[in-house]
Image (cartoon, helix red, strand yellow):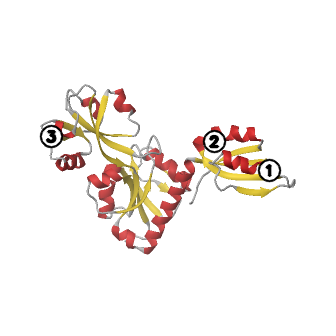
């Protein structure tokens, strides 16, 4: 077993988001436009890009010590790997995605049982077959190479497709009948590599830094000066300001407050702070948050 950590990076839709996440976590990964072998700024890591759909098989077989893929593909491939960390990010958002059974809005299919004898197109073939079997439904499941949502109703009766927001389904006038599973990106490891003390420590370090970068992505730091007498009013009025750091200023009647808040609430909190009398309010970005 090589002393270098062999890391599988997802090629395709997750590629750009993954490189950005690693950069935020402190790893610089570069590659040519046609290259599948990236250059890492960490001399202890090597690896290459492969499709997320295949990643878990390569990790299970030991071609990679670890890699990033979807929890759905681990399940689809029935891969025996160690799931090290859940990393909630995708190409479009930082949210959990769903594999859903969808049909045209005017379809007579209302429940799973209505799929008896029907045809379903999906990229997630085995998991869909298992889902039908669990519900005692017999239907044909065919593999779809992409653009699955445009195949109904002319080519198939229903589809099983991945959605983050549902916007593509709505745009194609499709209705969700059932959610088969939720999925998100996971860091997985080969069982042998996970038992190797040095490699396990390296994988855990990477997982920590990636999670820290994701935690910071939804939050911002906030600094402000405030009259000491108004601190309780601020904390009572703005519960999002949890456990702030309080520092004294040269003028003992004033304090400096520093905290971390959800990025999405800053637009409400900052005007409220100003109205209460806060001064010198500064919002600043965060790169990593380690709980």
With respect to residue 206, does 24 lie above or below?
A: above
Per the model, the C-alpha gap separating discs 3 and 1 is 70 Å
Q: Earlier in the sequence, mark 3 or mark 1?
A: 3
Q: Mark 1: give few (<14), some (14-19) or many (20+) Cα within 10 Å.
A: few
Give the label, 2 or 1, closer to the camera: 1
Residue at 65% from the left image edge and 46% from the top image edge? 238
Q: Is residue 68 visible?
A: yes
Query: Can you identify the residue that label 3 sits on?
Result: 140
Query: Can you identify the residue that label 1 sits on?
Result: 229
Give the label, 3 or 1, closer to the camera: 1
Among all residues in the image, which is located at the extreme right? 251
Per the model, the C-alpha gap separating discs 2 and 1 is 23 Å
With respect to residue 216, does 7 lie above or below?
A: below
Q: Earlier in the sequence, mark 2 or mark 1?
A: 1
Circle count: 3
Q: Which part of the image, by quadrant, shows the N terminus?
A: bottom left
Number of the label disc, if any, that sits on residue 27: none
Q: Which part of the image, by quadrant, shows the C terminus?
A: bottom right
Q: Residue 37's spot in the image, x, y percent?
A: 42, 53
> In the picture, residue 139 is in which quadrant?
top left
Per the model, the C-alpha gap separating discs 3 and 2 is 50 Å
Q: Tags 3 and 1 in contact by the CB under 8 Å rule?
A: no
Frontmost residue, 225 versus 120: 225
Q: Is residue 222 visible?
A: no
Query: Can you identify the residue that label 2 sits on?
Result: 266
Q: Mark 3: give few (<14), some (14-19) or many (20+) Cα within 10 Å.
A: some
**180 lies left or right of 225:** left
Frontmost residue, 37 versus 208: 208
Give the label, 3 or 2, closer to the camera: 2
Q: Residue 63's spot in the image, x, y percent?
A: 33, 62
Frontmost residue, 232 versus 254: 232
């Amino acid at each position: 077993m090589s002393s270098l950590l062999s890391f599988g990076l997802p090629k395709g839709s997750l590629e750009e988001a993954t490189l950005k996440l690693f950069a935020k976590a402190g790893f610089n990964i570069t590659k040519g436009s046609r290259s599948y072998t990236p250059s890492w700024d960490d001399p202890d890591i090597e690896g290459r890009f492969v499709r997320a759909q295949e990643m878990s098989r390569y990790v299970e077989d030991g071609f990679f010590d670890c890699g990033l893929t979807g929890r759905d593909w681990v399940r689809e491939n029935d891969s025996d790997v160690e799931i090290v960390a859940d990393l909630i990010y995708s190409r479009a958002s930082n949210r959990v995605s769903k594999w859903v059974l969808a049909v045209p809005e005017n379809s007579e299919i209302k429940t799973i049982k209505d799929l008896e004898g029907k045809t379903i197109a999906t990229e997630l073939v085995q998991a869909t077959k298992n889902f039908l079997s669990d519900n005692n439904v017999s239907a044909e499941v065919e593999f779809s190479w992409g653009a699955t949502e445009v195949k109904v109703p002319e080519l198939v009766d229903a589809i099983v497709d991945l959605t983050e927001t549902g916007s593509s389904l709505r745009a194609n006038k499709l209705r969700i009948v059932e959610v088969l599973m939720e999925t998100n990106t996971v860091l997985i490891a080969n069982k042998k590599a996970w038992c190797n003390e040095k490699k396990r420590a390296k994988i855990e370090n990477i997982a920590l830094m990636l999670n820290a970068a994701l935690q910071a992505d939804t939050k911002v730091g906030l600094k402000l000066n405030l009259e000491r007498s108004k601190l309780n009013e601020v904390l009572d009025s703005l519960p999002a300001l949890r456990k702030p750091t309080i520092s004294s200023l040269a003028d003992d009647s004033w304090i400096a407050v520093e905290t971390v808040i959800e990025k999405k609430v800053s637009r409400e909190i900052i005007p409220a702070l100003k109205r209460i009398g806060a001064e010198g309010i500064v919002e600043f970005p965060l790169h990593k948050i380690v709980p």
